[in-house]
């Protein structure tokens, strides 16, 4: 999925309104900040995205902050996840807000790692991922862990194409979760009874939701935050499957438990900014803003649901981001002011 970013016209400036704004600021004892005095004045910034529409929300929030710091923003480069990391590492892009840790650590290292980039701040640190099935089937057959699908009789319950194997809605080729799923199919002896269906994740999930609404059993992988969890609500419509033991590829380590103690087999995720080292070293204001940027999972879920309901154009997502900034204006403006002071203190 590749999504373009539409630039908007600033429109005609009303000189009377500009004069009045300056007068009001002076009357309040404030000194208007000239555009040329902002830390980003005269500098342009290139953001990179992973091609997943639902992740553009946080990117646009970050872009609004950079705009307030005076940066000129180039159209967002929408790439696949691997290319996104490479672009940042090579300096073709300055930053991405879509680095998922630890599932994308290998991609980060292959793109140059810390010698070429820096991970800055933590946008959210409560991302969960794993396998889920519909609650009706879980309760009826007492299915609680993924390894139960090594039993052909249990696996056949989730067969949607008639080959006798469970059909798992899984990850796109190249995503970090793909490697984990492929590793666990062997570790939990599921290779002979489970098919890992790959392609366009969101198209596959649309079909999965249709099957759920028709009363048919479903088996899928997902993560939080994501709109899927607002449609198929964990604990109500679906349940997380546990794993018999933690088994991760390539030496990956991390907490694999939900807050209730269920071991879902996938590490808890952080979403972080990955920025080109040259850019971040020469732009302390941008770095400070990235360090402060936080977005709650519930806010991302809510925005993603609006995308699912049809507000899926780039301009819609920008409006969602502007709405979030307005709703959180106090803390957001504090982040921007802090970033400005970072430059002033140098």
Image (tube, rainbow, N blue to C red):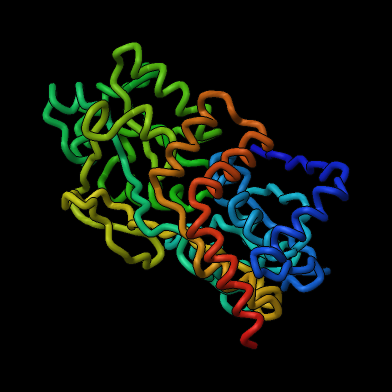
The C terminus appears in which quarter of the rendering?
bottom right
The N terminus appears in which quarter of the rendering?
top right
- Which residue is found at the position 64% from the left and 41% from the top? 318
- Which residue is found at the position 68% from the left and 49% from the top? 79
**Which residue reaches farthest top?**
214
92 or 160, which lies in front? Answer: 92
- In the drawing, does residue 315 fall left or right of residue 337? right
**Which residue reaches farthest front?**
27
- In the drawing, does residue 242 fall left or right of residue 158? left
Q: Residue 47: name its quadrant.
A: bottom right
- In the drawing, does residue 342 fall left or right of residue 219? right
Q: How many marks?
A: 0
Q: Residue 199: name its quadrant.
A: top right
319 or 275, which lies in front? Answer: 319
174 or 39, which lies in front? Answer: 39
- Which residue is found at the position 25% from the left and 48% from the top? 264
- In the drawing, does residue 75 fall left or right of residue 227? right
Residue 161 drawn at (x, y percent): 40, 18
Res. 90 visible in picture: yes
Res. 110 visible in picture: no
């Amino acid at each position: 999925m590749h999504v373009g970013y539409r630039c908007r016209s600033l429109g005609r400036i009303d000189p009377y309104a500009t004069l009045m704004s300056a007068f009001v600021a002076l009357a309040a004892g404030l000194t208007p900040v000239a555009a040329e005095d902002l830390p980003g004045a005269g500098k342009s910034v290139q953001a990179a995205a992973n091609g997943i529409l639902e992740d553009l929300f946080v990117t646009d929030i970050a872009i609004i902050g950079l705009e307030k710091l005076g940066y000129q923003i180039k159209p967002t480069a929408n790439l696949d996840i691997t290319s996104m990391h490479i672009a940042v590492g090579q300096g073709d892009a300055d930053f991405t807000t879509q680095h998922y840790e630890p599932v994308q650590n290998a991609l980060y290292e292959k793109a140059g790692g810390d010698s070429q980039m820096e991970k800055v701040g933590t946008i959210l640190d409560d991302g969960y991922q794993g396998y889920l099935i519909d609650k009706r089937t879980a309760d009826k057959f007492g299915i609680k862990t993924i390894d139960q699908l090594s039993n052909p009789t249990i696996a056949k319950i989730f067969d949607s194409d008639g080959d006798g194997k469970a059909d798992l809605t899984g990850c796109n080729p190249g995503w970090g979760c793909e490697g984990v799923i492929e590793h666990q199919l062997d570790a939990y002896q599921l290779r002979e009874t489970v098919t890992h269906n790959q392609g366009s994740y969101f198209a596959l999930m649309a079909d999965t939701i249709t099957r759920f609404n028709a009363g048919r059993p479903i088996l899928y992988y997902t993560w939080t935050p994501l709109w899927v969890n607002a449609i198929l609500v964990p604990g109500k419509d679906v349940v997380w499957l546990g794993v018999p033991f933690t088994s991760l590829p390539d030496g990956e380590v991390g907490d694999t438990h939900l807050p209730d103690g269920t071991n879902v087999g996938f590490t808890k995720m952080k979403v972080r900014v990955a920025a080109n080292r040259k850019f971040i070293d020469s732009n302390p204001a941008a770095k400070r803003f990235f360090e402060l940027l936080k977005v709650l999972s519930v806010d991302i879920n809510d925005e993603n649901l609006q995308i699912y309901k049809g507000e899926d154009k780039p301009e819609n997502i920008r409006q969602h981001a502007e709405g979030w900034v307005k709703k959180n204006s106090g803390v957001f403006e504090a982040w921007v002011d802090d970033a400005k002071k970072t430059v002033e203190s140098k």
